[in-house]
Image (cartoon, rainbow, N blue to C red):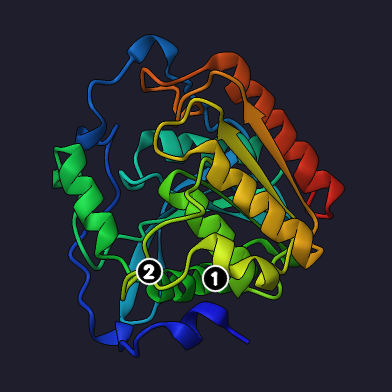
């Protein structure tokens, strides 16, 4: 049963127009200032990388795709944006995954709501995210997975990873798609106030989780209290799911975001290694 689509209000996403014309060039203006000295830039040597257009309900959605420049098929990883949209950091994450042998694709999941290249303030970015229905996101990710199968991706190996807003989406997609192989959620909210667009929280869907999920969290994350992560852990354990958590002590939210002051190099590198190991251990690599 599709937990999210069945519980969400009936909305015809095919009638929603797309307002964005492409992905963000450089970094999100809403995330400024950029801490240039810690920014990681992964080259495209040996890769096929760039913006693609993917058919989704109602039109075509821009996405950043990176994969090895050789014959596949490659395990697919859906890369889910932070609250700021698909900007250079998320594109670089795709290239890093492609260097490891994956087809990584990051869709512009706000495309029906806003052109994130024009959003200049954090509060405005939060407002845009609040307008995006979970059911719409699930349908768009299904479309991305289907496109990947026809464009170099493996027919059965499908992973997902996401950051912040995308971390929450990672948990939700693990409850949505019965064909998902594995997921890794970076500091995604698991408890919150339900509303019409986001009717269920990850903790409410623990029993519906269909793939092994690793959660990577900061112990000093002021937006995601540790006790809510423990609630998720308890719910998954009760439901008998395969999962793991790493909570890094004295570590803030967005510790993987190398372009922000919250970046913590040691924790980000350890989290990346744990993510890849989790992928391999659970059949994606």
Say if mark 2 contacts mark 1, CB within 8 Å: no
The structure residue drawn at horizontal position 32% and vertical position 72%, both measured from the top left corner, is 197
- Identify the residue position indicated by label 1 in the image: 147
Where's residue 120, x and y in %? 14, 38
Question: Is the residue 250 above or below the residue 83 in the image?
Answer: above
Could you tell me if residue 15 is visible in this image?
yes
Which residue is more in the foreground, 162 or 39?
A: 162
Where's residue 175, x and y in %? 62, 70
Q: Quadrant of residue 69?
A: top right
Instruction: Label 1, secondary structure: give it.
Output: helix
Q: Earlier in the sequence, mark 2 or mark 1?
A: 1
Which residue is more in the foreground, 16 or 197?
A: 197
Where's residue 154, x and y in %? 73, 64
Instruction: Label 2, secondary structure: give it.
Output: loop
Where's residue 206, x and y in %? 65, 65
Q: Left or right of 117: which side holds 8?
A: right
Q: Quadrant of residue 127?
A: bottom left
Which residue is more in the foreground, 237 or 103?
A: 237
Q: Left or right of 58: which side holds 165?
A: right
């Amino acid at each position: 049963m599709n937990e999210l689509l069945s519980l969400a209000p009936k909305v015809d996403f095919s009638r929603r127009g797309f307002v964005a014309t492409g992905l963000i060039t450089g970094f999100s203006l809403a995330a400024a200032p950029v801490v240039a000295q810690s920014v990681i830039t992964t080259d495209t040597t040996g890769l096929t990388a760039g913006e693609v257009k993917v058919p989704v309900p109602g039109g075509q959605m821009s996405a950043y795709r990176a994969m090895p420049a050789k014959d596949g098929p490659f395990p697919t990883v859906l890369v889910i944006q932070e609250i700021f949209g698909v900007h250079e950091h998320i594109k670089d994450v795709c290239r890093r995954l492609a260097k490891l042998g994956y087809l990584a694709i990051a869709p512009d999941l706000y495309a029906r709501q806003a052109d994130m290249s024009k959003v200049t303030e954090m509060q405005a970015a939060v407002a845009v995210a609040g307008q995006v229905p979970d059911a719409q996101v699930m349908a768009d990710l299904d479309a991305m997975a289907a496109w990947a199968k026809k464009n170099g991706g493996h027919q059965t190996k499908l992973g997902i990873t996401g950051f912040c807003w995308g971390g929450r989406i990672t948990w939700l997609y693990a409850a949505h798609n019965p064909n998902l192989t594995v997921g890794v959620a970076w500091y995604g909210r698991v408890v919150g106030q339900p509303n019409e667009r986001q009717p269920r929280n990850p903790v409410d869907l623990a029993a519906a989780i269909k793939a092994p999920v690793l959660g990577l969290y900061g112990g000093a994350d002021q937006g995601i209290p540790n006790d809510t992560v423990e609630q998720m852990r308890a719910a998954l354990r009760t439901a008998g799911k395969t999962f793991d958590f790493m909570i890094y002590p004295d570590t803030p939210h967005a510790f993987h975001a190398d372009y922000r002051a919250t970046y913590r190099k040691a924790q980000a590198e350890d989290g990346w290694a744990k993510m890849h190991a989790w992928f391999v251990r659970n059949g994606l690599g």
